[in-house]
Image (cartoon, rainbow, N blue to C red):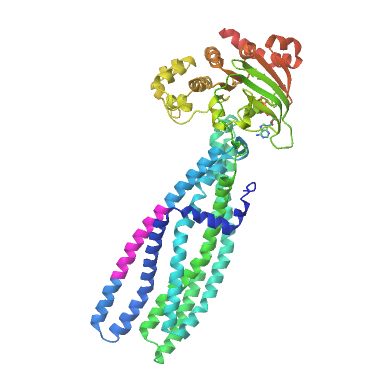
Amino acid sequence: MANSPDSDTRTPPHVLWRGLSLLRGRRRLLAGALLTTLVISAGQLAGPKLKQIGIDDGIRAGDARLLGWVVVVALGVHLATVVAGYFQASLLNRIGQDAIHDLRLRLFDHLQAQSLDYYEREQPGQIISRILNDMDAINELLTSTVTALLADVVVLVGTSVILFRYHTGLALAIHFLIPLMFLLGWAFRTRVHATFMRARQTIAAVTARLHESVAGMRVIQGFAREHRSCEEFGQLLQEDRDANMAGATVFATLSPGVELINALGICIVFWYGGLLILRGELAIGVAVAFILYLNHLFDPVRRLSEMFATVQRAVVALERVFEVLDRKPTVTNAPGAVSIPPLRDGVEFRGVCFSYDGAREILRDVSFRAGFGETVALVGPTGAGKSTILKLLARFYDPQAGEILLDGRDLRSVTLESLRRQIGFVPQEPFLFAGSLRDNIRYGRPDAPDAEVERAARLAQAHDFIAALPEGYDTDVHERGVRLSGGQRQLIAFARALLVNPRILILDEATSSVDPFTEKRIQDALRVLLRDRIAFVIAHRLSTVVHADQILVVQDGGIAARGRHEELLYSCSLYRALYERRFQDTAEEEAVVA
Ligand code: ATP
């Protein structure tokens, strides 16, 4: 939210108001819940009054008929309260679940619209925590707090009115205890807020670490860091435990305080009320009603002051959620952006300069042109800026200076959807989603018929190994026992890209070496993949650079040299050094399979 123009939402009343607006569209359900709440509150208020009438006008006045009626009415009131309680619970549940469902979906949708910079900065676990953990507090606010507020106010005011009508002096004596209860609740609120904040942060840290550890398990095991990793996780769990324990301790100190004030109230009624009865100024039934009403007086006061804690907890959660919802993607469609037709001519970078943080320049004055049908290989030392060039081409970021043109059109003037639809992206470590191999291949074209999926797999040299699996294309990639090698995953990614048949292909070749047979397959598949489109490859294979129409040697964010393999071998010492260090290793492997 810090970046958001909507920054006034940071003040709690605004956040709260905005949070309550999540109930919009659920007015009927809410009205039903409030109505049932009123019925329950009325039932609570009627209980002691009925007992007083039963004692004074029934038992003491010797009126058995009235006593009978009072019992019948009391039963009716109980029944109504129970029925209303049932409807209240189910309505509140429905309201809460619906609101959380919608909010989670909005958050997820919004997350998908975020630009790459957001994901390169945020920890995945922290994002997940906002969608999962923060929702409980918001749910509580939207359901129980809203109705409890109404119920407590109704019961508090109703009880006060009834007590004052019974006996002003005795009512006044008891009402003196209300500020005490408020003070107790207030002190409680202040302490509980700090513990809630801590608990929220500790559970987010636990989620983030858990996510990171599961994702990085191979590295943890590879470096035999299990013990240390467990210790670190244990430390976070301990902090979470401590934060929750502190919260529980604060809660535990509340009940004795409440009981003490209650006991004081009962003593006042006994002593002062008893004196009034002795003097004949008060009926016994009224004194009993006073004692029964005490809870109705103190409970709402305590809950109302505690409610600040619930509200604050929800405000903290809402702030975290709205921060995501208010975050504008850094890369969006410009006003008037047009849909670009399929690329025909080529791609051009003109004097492109770029920095991720606005301070350190990563790309300086990058200019090159690539025509349709060409394969452009990017080579250069690590950190030189090769991936960054391709991230700009897919418009994950916008350059600070210069322009990137597709068929002579600035990237910023075309819609992101029409641009990305033309681009096929094959990362170094392809990501496979849960589901069958078939669904993974047709990821970019979910409606592709099976025959086309198979054709793409054949072209990508993936068909043979898929067909050899017991369940073939229906094999679930995340199922136990299914292990795809790095090379096989690459072939699946090739098939996925081929099925979409993108005009522009961006490929980050894997560096990991594979067995000679897979290597041969990858090379054959690559030849098909790179054909009939414009392809940009961060090249790690000799065969790729040798066949490339244009090699861009990237160094320190600039294009140090360009040309074909043989030309560069003679003209560029950096390329020659790279060739000797990197490509010659693969040259030996490639020779084995040639
Ligand atoms: P490699 O061959 O190792 O993948 P590369 O040539 O592709 O390297 P880039 O990934 O483009 O290099 O990175 C270029 C520079 O930009 C590096 O110094 C890197 O630290 C920096 N960089 C990359 N991504 C980010 C980011 N999201 N935020 C800030 N700096 C970044």
Can you say which quadrant of the picture contains the C terminus?
A: top right
Residue extending furthest toward the left: 65
Looking at the rendering, the stretch of residues picked out in magenta corresponds to 76-95
**Quadrant of the rendered image containing residue 543:** top right
Residue at figure coordinates x 66%, y 15% from the top left: 550
Q: Is residue 90 magenta?
A: yes
Q: Is residue 264 visible?
A: yes
Q: Is residue 16 above or below residue 526?
A: below
Residue 416 rendering spot, x and y as whole percentages: 57, 32
Residue 395 rendering spot, x and y as whole percentages: 61, 31
Q: Is residue 578 above or below residue 444?
A: above
Of 372 and 409, nearer the camera is 409
**Quadrant of the rendered image containing residue 217:** top right
Q: Main secondary structure of the magenta part?
A: helix
User: Ligand 1 is found in which quarter of the picture?
Assistant: top right
Badge count? 0
Residue 175 rendering spot, x and y as whole percentages: 50, 78
Residue at figure coordinates x 62%, y 29% from the top left: 411
Of 71 and 2, nearer the camera is 2
Residue at figure coordinates x 49%, y 82% from the top left: 172
Q: Is residue 177 above or below residue 469?
A: below
Residue extending furthest toward the front: 336
Q: Is residue 115 above or below residue 276?
A: above
Quick check: 291 left or right of 3? Answer: left
**Quadrant of the rendered image containing residue 294:** bottom left
Quick check: 238 left or right of 568? Answer: left
Residue 279 rendering spot, x and y as whole percentages: 41, 92
Q: Is residue 557 visible?
A: no
